[in-house]
């Protein structure tokens, strides 16, 4: 047997109907693109729930009344569990910008409260997104 590799067009006479998938790797049809977002796993969801519970207490203990009135709606991994996206709800009697500035000023305090509440080597980075409720 020769060591020459056979080309895909040499097998054309063996196929009934030639399609673009002939001669290709079947694993490539089911492969995700390298930059496709991954769905959060069970451990990531568990971490997000722990961070949400820690942030609810941290918001209540913050000195700024705008931050105290804000609520944590959801915590999601963005794009992985090293960085978490925190959706903060603004009550109707507070200004959207005031709450946003207060949360950004308190970001270091909030991250330290989260770090003390969860058991991980590195505290996740928190990215706050303020939305009206």
Image: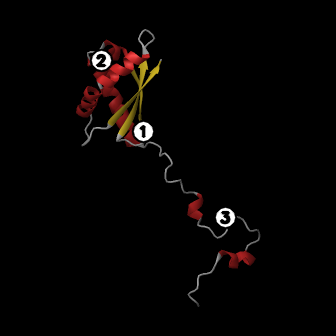
Q: Is residue 9 left or right of residue 112?
A: right
Look at the image and tell me whether residue 70 can be seen. no
Q: Which residue is mark 2?
A: 60
Q: Which residue is mark 1?
A: 78
Q: Residue at x 72, y 75 (%)?
A: 12
Measure the C-alpha gap from mark 2 to mark 1.
Answer: 25 Å
* Quarter where residue 114 is shown: top left
Measure the C-alpha gap from mark 1 to mark 3.
Answer: 35 Å
User: What coloring was used for the rendering?
Assistant: secondary structure
Residue 21 bears which disc, if any?
A: 3
Measure the C-alpha gap from mark 2 to mark 3.
Answer: 58 Å
Location of residue 66 in the rendering, given as x and y in whole percent from the top left corner: 34, 14
Query: Mark 1 and mark 2 in contact (Cβ < 8 Å)?
Result: no
Q: Residues within 10 Å of mark 2 (few under 14, many from 20)?
A: some
Secondary structure at badge 3 equals loop
Q: Is residue 18 left or right of residue 50?
A: right
Q: Residues within 10 Å of mark 1 (few under 14, many from 20)?
A: some
Q: Is residue 59 left or right of residue 89?
A: left
Look at the image and tell me whether residue 11 can be seen. yes
In the rendered image of this protein, does residue 55 appear above or below residue 82? above
The tag earlier along the polypeptide, 1 or 3, is: 3
Which quarter shows the N terminus?
bottom right
* Quarter where residue 26 is shown: bottom right
């Amino acid at each position: 047997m020769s060591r020459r590799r056979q080309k895909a067009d040499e097998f054309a006479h063996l196929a009934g109907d030639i399609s673009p998938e002939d001669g290709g790797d079947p694993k490539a049809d089911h492969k995700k693109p390298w930059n496709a977002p991954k769905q959060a796993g069970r451990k990531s969801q568990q971490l997000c729930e722990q961070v949400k519970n820690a942030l609810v207490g941290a918001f209540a203990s913050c000195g700024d009344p705008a931050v105290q009135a804000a609520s944590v709606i959801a915590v999601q991994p963005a794009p992985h569990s090293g960085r978490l996206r925190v959706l903060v709800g603004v009550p109707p009697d507070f200004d959207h910008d005031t709450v946003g500035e207060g949360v950004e000023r308190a970001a270091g305090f909030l991250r330290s409260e989260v770090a003390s509440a969860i058991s991980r080597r590195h505290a996740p980075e928190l990215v706050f997104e303020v939305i009206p409720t």
